[in-house]
Amino acid sequence: MKKARVTITQRWLVNSLGAIFIVLMSVLLAFSVFINFYFTSSARQYITSRINMISGMLQQSYSDNSLSFTSDIRSIVENWSERDKTELMTINSRGDVTMTSSGFAPTKEILAQDYYDAVESGASGYFMGKLASGEKIIAVSVVTPDKSGDYSVIRLVSSMKNIDKSIASYIIAAAFICCAILALMMFSGMYFVKSIVIPVRQLGATARRYARGDFSVRIPVKSDDEMGELCEIVNKMADGLSQSEAMKNEFISSVSHELRTPLTAIKGWAETIGSMPDDRETVSKGMRVITAETERLSQMVEELLDFSRMQNGKFTLTKDNVDILAELGDAVLIYTEKARKEGIELVYTEPEDLPIVYGDRNRLRQVFINVIDNAIKYSEKGGLVTVTAAVTQDSRIEIEVSDTGCGISPEDLPKIKTKFFRANHNKRGSGIGLAVADEIMTMHGGSMEIFSEQGTGTSVVISLPIKTK
Ligand SMILES: Nc1ncnc2c1ncn2[C@@H]1O[C@H](COP(=O)(O)OP(=O)(O)OP(=O)(O)O)[C@@H](O)[C@H]1O
Ligand SMILES: [Mg+2]
């Protein structure tokens, strides 16, 4: 079963947004705990300070004059100024509420742990929580000096409703801010992710077309960042691929053509000989052509095989001492007849002597043949091809083959050593001659430089190291 693909967007949602969500939730939780603590402790502080103030006043009144104590406590409760926020009450020694600041007599259920703690300890008590009625309150009780009378305990009570409401509204506001931050992160993140995901999808779709061999499309480069650079590289790659694809196709068609021409000649002559086997002259002429064409064919196949070996990295040299003078002389000799037939003058200024080179004799001859072949092939009738050889000051053998042919344009010049590349489509060729020659030169530690001027001629300079010791 194929594993479901996790998209960049999904990964971003889980990794990045997920982490932010967890952080925000933790902050919200911490804030809620803090705000709850802050409000309840403030309420407790407030209510405690109030009751302490009253208790102080009562202590004072009792020690001044215990007879006026009752009227003092009554007046304090009746005139309690903060009755809208809190309720002040007095409780007698039997546990009954004797007086309230609101004036309403409450039921006994309103007493809570604060009262019992105060009575038990003979000092004070605090309570925050729910009553049996379900109402949430905060309360403090303090024992008065009138221990056995009607006002043995005073108590200050406040409902937690408003405080809880404030806490809730703060938490809701904080939650809202968290949601807003999350939404903002999501939008900005989405924008960012899209700026990557959309071009990546486009790249993918285009690359798939390239994989199918369709190089007609290019990716629009929309940004100046890494993504734009990647698109540019892919476009360049497509240019290169489509060019080499076109060159390969052209190579196949030109090679087939090259192979067909000698085959046509061989077939034609074979049929002629077959139809007139007794005509000695025709037979011998035909046999000559057949032999020559067969030779050409096998040379071509040899060149193709060399090229294919070169591509596979299996191209090897059989090295020995080579007399360059002899090999160059051979190559010139092979082309003397051809040049004469085509009305091209081939001038070879043969040097007296040339030092020995350590290399592969057949391969080196092949290089000379390829270069001379080009010089003649790309020259017109009446042209001049000169071949010279000399030893340079830095102890290398330099062979120069110059022609007065069509030349090569400056744009094509850097590419002509590339496989399958042909600058001139008027002449037949497969575009591998110079690629093979260049490889052979490199393998000999030599070099092949080409100088050319369009319409004037071309000069190929081959340089080889001399064998030392
Ligand atoms: N002497 C030259 N004058 C002008 N153009 C040349 C010359 N030598 C090479 N070129 C250009 O360089 C191209 C590549 O040469 P190369 O020898 O690699 O291929 P080719 O001659 O076309 O085919 P082949 O594989 O049969 O040699 C040629 O197609 C031609 O356009
Ligand atoms: Mg050639």
Image (cartoon, rainbow, N blue to C red):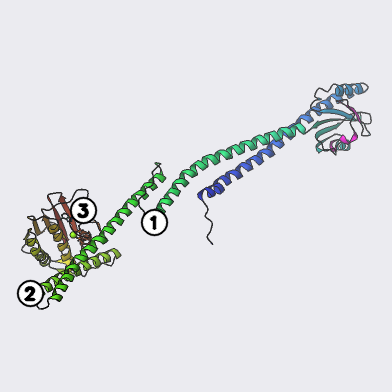
Q: Is residue 41 visible?
A: no
Q: Residue furthest bottom?
A: 278
Residue position for label 3: 423
Query: Could you say which disc has been placed on residue 323 in the image?
Result: none
Q: Looking at the rendering, which quadrant does residue 345 occupy?
A: bottom left
Specify the quarter for ligand 1.
bottom left
Against 50, is 205 above or below? below
Between residues 372 and 162, which one lies in front from this camera angle?
372
The stretch in magenta equals 97-114
Q: Residue at x 8, y 62 (%)?
A: 341
Residue 304 location, x and y as percent?
A: 24, 65
Residue 254 location, x and y as percent?
A: 23, 60
Q: Secondary structure at mark 3?
A: loop
Residue position for label 2: 281
Q: Amino acid at mark 3?
A: Ala
Return the disc, 1 or 3, that comes first in the chain's sequence: 1
Which quadrant, please, contains the C terminus?
bottom left
Q: Residue at x 32, y 53 (%)?
A: 242
Q: Residue at x 20, y 70 (%)?
A: 298
Indicate left or right for 91 with 371 as reference: right
Indicate left or right for 235 with 453 as reference: right
Which is in the foreground here, disc 2 or disc 3?
2
Which is in the foreground here, disc 2 or disc 1?
2
Return the disc, 2 or 1, that comes first in the chain's sequence: 1
Give the class, few, some or many, for how many residues have Cα within 10 Å of label 1's Cα (few <14, many ≥20): few
Q: Looking at the rendering, which quadrant does residue 146 occupy?
A: top right
Residue position for label 1: 211
Indicate left or right for 351 with 432 as reference: left
Q: Amino acid at mark 1?
A: Ala
Between residues 32 and 343, which one lies in front from this camera angle?
343
Give the class, few, some or many, for how many residues have Cα within 10 Å of label 3's Cα (few <14, many ≥20): some
